[in-house]
Every structure is written in structure tokens, then in C-alpha cells.
């Protein structure tokens, strides 16, 4: 029996959402080519955001995780020069009982807002500034599909944080260097350098390269440079 082939000039059939999820991990370039040909993003957004929300909320279901989240909140407020009196601390502790729901809901709401804004920035850079002609919908689809790596990261770190009663990343440089003071500049910087963020940036660069028919390396270098500037600025601002 002869193998079925795609007629010349026609785009390949659209992959289902689960095939695209696996494809972004195992064969990102080929999968992004399919995404660009069929820029559907809602199904992948729902899948990845559900995974990320679940992974982020999972540690909050334990007393240790809730306390770790509360300690992190207080530490962040104090690093900004704010004082946390006992009454406010007690109120925060009571509100923390709803942490799993607040965390999961926040991920679902803010993920789409951030994705829409980031896609708009990418559209402005590649289309308006660099002469590209991709549609906003296609850029959003590429960005959402790159989020598979973020979902994979939560599938890995969520259960780990559940058992260790923590909310910090288990895959950051800071996790590998526990001797660092997490309130210092170096400690803050190490805590934001994460292997899954690096992987996500590489995959996003691949997707943009496929979309705009450009080389991956220059795009990746630019994304990494922006990432480094952001983490350096945040670490300098938050360090004690």
C-alpha cells in the first residue's frame, strides 16, 4: 500500500494539542513549522496553564509550603524597606490558608495577560522594527507553544517542592549552591538563573526563527541578553 503524501503547495495537516506538546520537547523546529502553518493557541494555552497552575499550587497544600510562601512574602516586603507588624503578619497568615486557590487562579489570569503583552512586544520588534510580516495571532501561537517548557518545569519542580515544603525553584543555580546567602546580590542572581528558563528561551528563539525564517543564534543571543539584564537589575534592587 502506498504511503500517503502531502500534495505539493499544501501545508501539512494540523497536529493535535498533545502531539504538539510532545513535539515542542522532542522536535521543536518541525513542530513550530506546523504551528506557523496552523496558528492555533487556545488549546495549548489551556493545557500548559493548567499544568503550571497545578504545579505552582501543589506546594501550597502543605503547611510547610504555606509557611515558606509567607516567609518569602515577608522577605520581599522587607527588601523593599517595608515593615511587617505582628497584626499584618497574622492577617497574611490567615489569608495564606487560601494560598493554593489564590496561586492557581493568579497563574491562570496573569498568564494570558503576560502572554498577550509579550506577544505584542515581539510583534513590534520583529514586524515594525525589523520588517517582518507575521500576524499577531501567529506570534502569540509560537509564544504559547514555547510555554510547553515552562509547563514541563512545573511538572518537575511542583512535586519536588511539595515534598520539600518549599516554593523556590528546585532547578535554579541557587538550588545547586545552597551555601549562598539568598538575600545577597549573588544569591538573588543565582536564584533567578534557572535551567528551564534557559531552555524556554532557546525554544522560543527556535520558534521565532522558524516564523521569520531567520537564524536561531542571533535571536537566542538577544533573548539571553535581555534576560540577563532583567535578572541583574532585579537582583541589584532586591538584594540586602
Image (spheres, helix red, strand yellow):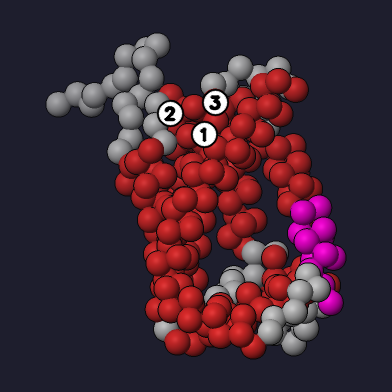
216 with respect to 99 (left or right): right
* Residue 175: mark in rendering: none
Name the residue at 61% across, 17% down.
133
Name the residue at 63% across, 28% down.
123
Along the polypeptide, which appears first: circle 1 or circle 2? 2
Point out residue 146 in the picture as x, y percentages from the top left corner: 52, 45
* Residue 136: mark in rendering: 3
The residue range painted magenta reads: 229-240
Q: Which is the main secondary structure of the residues drawn in magenta? A: helix
Mark 1 residue element: helix
Mark 2 residue element: loop
Along the polypeptide, which appears first: circle 3 or circle 2? 2
Front residue of this view, candidates 82 and 12: 82
Picture quarter with the N terminus: top left
The reply to whether callout 3 and callout 1 are in contact (CB within 8 Å) is yes
**Residue 101 sits above or below residue 181 on the image:** above
* Residue 39: mark in rendering: 2
233 with respect to 65 (left or right): right
Point out residue 45 in the picture as x, y percentages from the top left corner: 41, 44
Q: How far apart, in angstroms, are the residues tagged by discs 3 and 2?
A: 10 Å
Name the residue at 48% across, 77% down.
96
Q: How far apart, in angstroms, are the residues tagged by discs 1 and 2?
A: 8 Å
- Neighbor class of circle 2 (other Cα within 10 Å; few <14, some 14-19, many 20+) is many
Front residue of this view, candidates 162 and 35: 162
The reply to whether callout 1 and callout 2 are in contact (CB within 8 Å) is yes
Amino acid at each position: 500500500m502506498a504511503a500517503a503524501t502531502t500534495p505539493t503547495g499544501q501545508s501539512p495537516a494540523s497536529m493535535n494539542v498533545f502531539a504538539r506538546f510532545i513535539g515542542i520537547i522532542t522536535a521543536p523546529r518541525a513542530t513550530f513549522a506546523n504551528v506557523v502553518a496552523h496558528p492555533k493557541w487556545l488549546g495549548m494555552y489551556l493545557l500548559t496553564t493548567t499544568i503550571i497552575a497545578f504545579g505552582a499550587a501543589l506546594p501550597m497544600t502543605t503547611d510547610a509550603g504555606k509557611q515558606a510562601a509567607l516567609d518569602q512574602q515577608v522577605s520581599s516586603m522587607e527588601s523593599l524597606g517595608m515593615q511587617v507588624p505582628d497584626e499584618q503578619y497574622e492577617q497574611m497568615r490567615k489569608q495564606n490558608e487560601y494560598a493554593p486557590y489564590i496561586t492557581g487562579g493568579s497563574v491562570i489570569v496573569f498568564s494570558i495577560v503576560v502572554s498577550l503583552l509579550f506577544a505584542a512586544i515581539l510583534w513590534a520588534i520583529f514586524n515594525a522594527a525589523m520588517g517582518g510580516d507575521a500576524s499577531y495571532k501567529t506570534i502569540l501561537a509560537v509564544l504559547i507553544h514555547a510555554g510547553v517548557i515552562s509547563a514541563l518545569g512545573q511538572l518537575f519542580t511542583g512535586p519536588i517542592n511539595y515534598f520539600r515544603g518549599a516554593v523556590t525553584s528546585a532547578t535554579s543555580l541557587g538550588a545547586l549552591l545552597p551555601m549562598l546567602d539568598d538575600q545577597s546580590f549573588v544569591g538573588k542572581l543565582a536564584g533567578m538563573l534557572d535551567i528551564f528558563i534557559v531552555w524556554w528561551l532557546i525554544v522560543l528563539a527556535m520558534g521565532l526563527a522558524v516564523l521569520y525564517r531567520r537564524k536561531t543564534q542571533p535571536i537566542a543571543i538577544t533573548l539571553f541578553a535581555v534576560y540577563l539584564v532583567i535578572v541583574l537589575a532585579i537582583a541589584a534592587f532586591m538584594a540586602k
